Amino acid sequence: MSAPAAPRGSAAWPRRAARAIDGWYRRDAPAPRLAALRVLVGGFATIYLAARVVHLISFIDFPARGFAPVGVVGLLSAPLPAALVVAPVLLALPCALAFTLGWRFRVTGPTFAALLLWVLSYRNSWGMIFHTENLMVVHIIVLGLTRSADAWSLDARRGRATPTPGAYGWPIRLLALVTVATYAIAGVAKLRLSGLGWVGSDLLRNYIAYDNLRKLELGDYHSPLGAALVGHAWLFPPLAGLSLALELLAPLALFGPRLARGWALAAWAFHAGVLAVMAIFFPYPLCGLAFAPLFAVERLALWRWLGLTPRPA
């Protein structure tokens, strides 16, 4: 006896689903939108590096026993000579400016992405790992390896970059996916490490108390607000639940501008709260740039002020 025939169309749904996902991911976008992201993120990275030059080269005087290579720096078994620490930092600055301006981008785009990854990974190989920089670095890598300088760039003005239809939507989608993935992964990590106990216990309260006490003992800046709030235990289960929901529901931001606006505002408020109660500053999301790939940033009034778009009649 032959097997019953499968319901009509049942074998085709994976293909239809794959085509729908591909259509969403490869949906076209204007070249200025990707270019606007390059200018915004590249400009932030340029300022960030310039403000931290002294810190980034300070490790040349550290004892070798403190060297614990992470990421790409894991290729090393010992610290680099001073000259090889200073050179990438100083080279990264002009490359950052060239990246932002879109000058000879086929070279400077990937070069700056590689330098930024190396410089910040080397800094993180000396003790504390600064997770606040990770999203910015990944965004720079995506922008540096795609056609983000085909508009609003020195290359475009000199005729070295020609807009290519279909080349700008998927990098923007990838940038957005990276953003929401970082939050979703953080939520999953909380569940793996502590389960729903994260919501129903004093874990968040204890963490805030420990962080502020440690900073106080070390003479570092701490949050007086956080220190005061830990005396009110009832506050923390709801706050823990909201933080977990914000992270796990991050993918909803990919399903339309209203959801994106609501989630981005909630995520920004989350980081503002972390700054208020723990004195931990996440500059990239607090400036709004972590969420920029979710929006039509080429429509910002900033660009008319810079003369990149015509003023309305």
Image (cartoon, grey):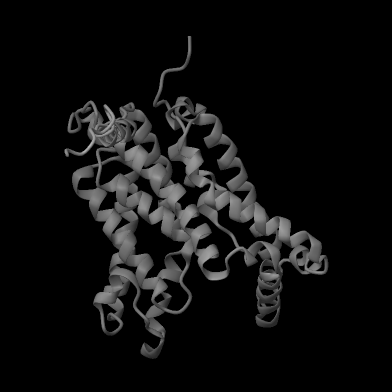
Q: Quadrant of residue 232?
A: bottom right
Q: Is residue 208 left or right of residue 122?
A: right
Say above or below: 52 vs 255. below
Say above or below: 267 vs 238. above
Q: Quadrant of residue 148?
A: top left
Q: Is residue 283 left or right of residue 217?
A: left
How many numbered circles are shown?
0
Q: Nearer the viewer, residue 158 or 142?
A: 142
**Could you tell me residue 88's position as x and y percent?**
29, 66
Question: Which residue is at a point 70% across and 73% down the rendered structure image?
Answer: 206
**Could you tell me residue 241's position as x and y percent?**
66, 56
Question: Which residue is at a point 37% across and 81% down the rendered structure image?
Answer: 68
Q: Nearer the viewer, residue 82 or 40?
A: 40
Question: Which residue is at a point 70% across and 56% down the rendered structure image?
Answer: 239
Question: Which residue is at a point 36% across and 38% down the rendered structure image?
Answer: 173
Residue at the limit of the structure toward the top, as seen here: 313
Asked whether residue 298 is in view, the answer is yes
Q: Is residue 63 left or right of residue 270?
A: left
The quarter of the image holding the N terminus is top left
Residue at the limit of the structure toward the front, as seen here: 1
**Could you tell me residue 181's position as x and y percent?**
43, 51
**Could you tell me residue 258's position as x and y percent?**
55, 30
Q: Nearer the viewer, residue 304 or 224?
A: 224
Asked whether residue 98 is in view, the answer is no
Q: Is residue 94 left or right of residue 43?
A: left
